[in-house]
Image (cartoon, rainbow, N blue to C red):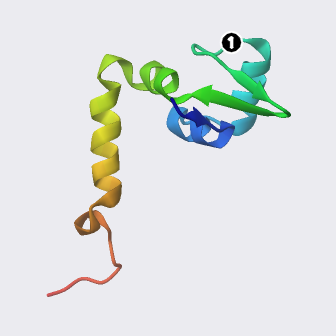
Amino acid sequence: MRLLSTQEVAQILGVSESGVRLNAQKGRLGFRTVRVGSKWKFPDEEVYLYAYGANWREHVKQQDLTDEDPSNASSGTEQI
């Protein structure tokens, strides 16, 4: 299990970091939260399950492949 940062959770859920922090403080998130010093951390599997549902592993795997595939990267130049 990996713990995600507030920034990572905000990006996954498509919300602001302050919204994640506020809802973590109030216990309104649909997954566990862990306080490490002054920072919030979130179990990755629970966040992905909440965000993507039962097929989250396939979604994350597909996303990782897209991020690593250089053919998907745009170079900004078009070849004719």
Q: Secondary structure at mark 1?
A: loop
Residue 39 lies, in percent from the top left, at 79, 35
Residue 51 lies, in percent from the top left, at 46, 25
**At x 68% / y 12%, what residue is drawn?**
28
**At x 35% / y 26%, what residue is drawn?**
56
Residue 49 lies, in percent from the top left, at 43, 20
Residue 57 lies, in percent from the top left, at 32, 29
Dividing the image into 4 quarters, which one contains the C terminus? bottom left
* Residue annotated with mark 1: 28
Q: Is residue 19 left or right of residue 79?
A: right
Q: Is residue 11 left or right of residue 27?
A: left
Q: Nearer the viewer, residue 35 or 58?
A: 35
Q: Is residue 13 left or right of residue 27?
A: left
Judge the density around disc 1: few (<14), some (14-19), many (≥20) Cα neighbours within 10 Å. Answer: few
Q: Is residue 68 left or right of residue 43?
A: left
**At x 73% / y 21%, what residue is drawn?**
24
Q: Amino acid at mark 1?
A: Arg
Question: Quadrant of the rendered structure where residue 78 is?
Answer: bottom left
